[in-house]
Amino acid sequence: MRLGDLAGQDHAVALLLRAVEAGRVAHAYLFDGPPGVGKRSAAIGLGMALACPEEPGTGCGRCDVCRRILAGNHPDVRVFAPATAQFLIEQAQEIVLLASGRPHEAPARVLVLDDADRLNPNAANCLLKTLEEPFPGTHLILVTAAPDRLLPTIRSRTQRVRFVPVRPALLERIARDRGAPPERAQVAAALAAGSVAALGELLGGEAEAALWQVVSDLRRAAADRQMGPLFAAAAAAGDKEGKERLPAALALLGRFYRDALAVAAGADDLVLLRARAAELAPLAEAARRHPGLSTLRRALAAVVEADTALAGNANAVLAVERLLLELRACEQEAA
């Protein structure tokens, strides 16, 4: 995509387009931010903006040069990914060689290192002088979601451009533009954690109905006055199929409680799961009867705690049992 078409990265895009317009593109950049938010696309878009003969400064996305860049077939806009678990010294040497000469045909050369945090010390040290003084018109772009794993000597030789998680409302709009029905778009946006790449995977994966069923089962067990359903729901969450769905279901449950908290606070414009308004209302109404909306706040904190425990390989059954015990006050009052 063209640099200006990148969704949700207004600050980074504006900074780069200003640099192109002023002829002050840095010789080395560090594009850092969460996975799947468009860092690599921005690097390729910058290459188009510098190389496109039809719309220089922005890139047209249609001409032969832009099409070859997008297809990965242009000699002056190259993307390098780790050949193994790490970048090999041979790859670093190839980059150094390319950066030491004139572009083949474009006015500038752009060399992109994807997952640059996987540079081993030898490969990183090989690039130091090139990062500091590449051939005029050559620009190196290091792309990473883990900038702290890069050597300080690498980071100090680059201009940092930060990329941020994409707002849920924008993710929902992207999902609907791709043909997703409203509720599926809302659920995918809630679970994507700010990532356009994750959004695409969610839209092409398991239907949201299965996740909502898990959420409903957990809430129903917490609302029951008897303890039996609570232990049964926890046991179901611990079997093979339950474990596979549990992380996504907890993320959806957390968003559900967060939206109920927004409704209870009178901030309806912040609600994402609008298709579930009828289920959010009783929770919000019950929460208003407690100082500081304390029951909903505790419920949301319990979901976060359970998710953290599961990420640390805690016993799924025990984590869900504890979660449901914490949710009882909130769910029983709203039932």
Image (cartoon, rainbow, N blue to C red):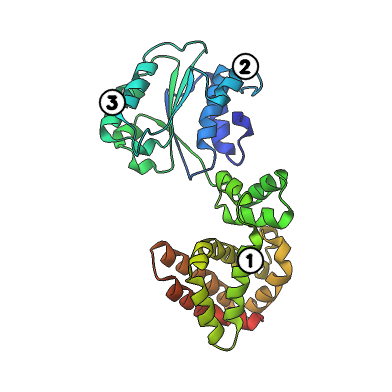
Look at the picture and state if 169 lies above or below 86: below
Q: Residue at 35% across / 34% down in the picture?
A: 155
Look at the picture and state if 89 lies above or below 280: above
Mark 2 belongs to which amino acid?
Asp
* Location of residue 176 in the rendering, given as x and y in whole percent from the top left corner: 71, 47
Question: Mark 2 near mark 3, Cβ–Cβ under 8 Å?
Answer: no
Q: Which residue does the numbered mark 1 point to in the structure image?
A: 212
Which quarter of the image is occupied by the N terminus? top right
**47 or 318: nearer the viewer:** 318
User: Mark 3 Cα within 10 Å, few/some/many (few <14, many 20+)?
Assistant: some
Mark 3 belongs to which amino acid?
Cys
Look at the picture and state if 64 lies above or below 299: above
**19 or 5: nearer the viewer:** 5
**Label placed on residue 64:** 2
Q: Secondary structure at mark 2?
A: helix
* Residue lying at the far bottom of the rendered structure: 226
Is tag 3's residue or tag 1's residue first in the polypeptide sequence?
3
* Location of residue 77 in the rendering, given as x and y in whole percent from the top left corner: 49, 21
Q: Residue at 49% across / 44% down in the picture?
A: 35
Q: Residue at 40% across / 43% down in the picture?
A: 146
Is tag 2's residue or tag 1's residue first in the polypeptide sequence?
2
Mark 1 belongs to which amino acid?
Trp
Residue 151 placement, left or right of 256: left
Q: Residue at 52% across / 74% down in the picture?
A: 236
Cα–Cα gap, marks 2 and 1: 47 Å
Is tag 2's residue or tag 3's residue first in the polypeptide sequence?
2
**Label placed on residue 126:** 3
* Location of residue 207 in the rendering, given as x and y in whole percent from the top left corner: 64, 57
- Looking at the rendered image, the disc whose residue lies closer to the viewer, 3 or 1, is 1
Question: Mark 3 near mark 1, Cβ–Cβ under 8 Å?
Answer: no
Could you tell me if residue 18 is visible in this image? no
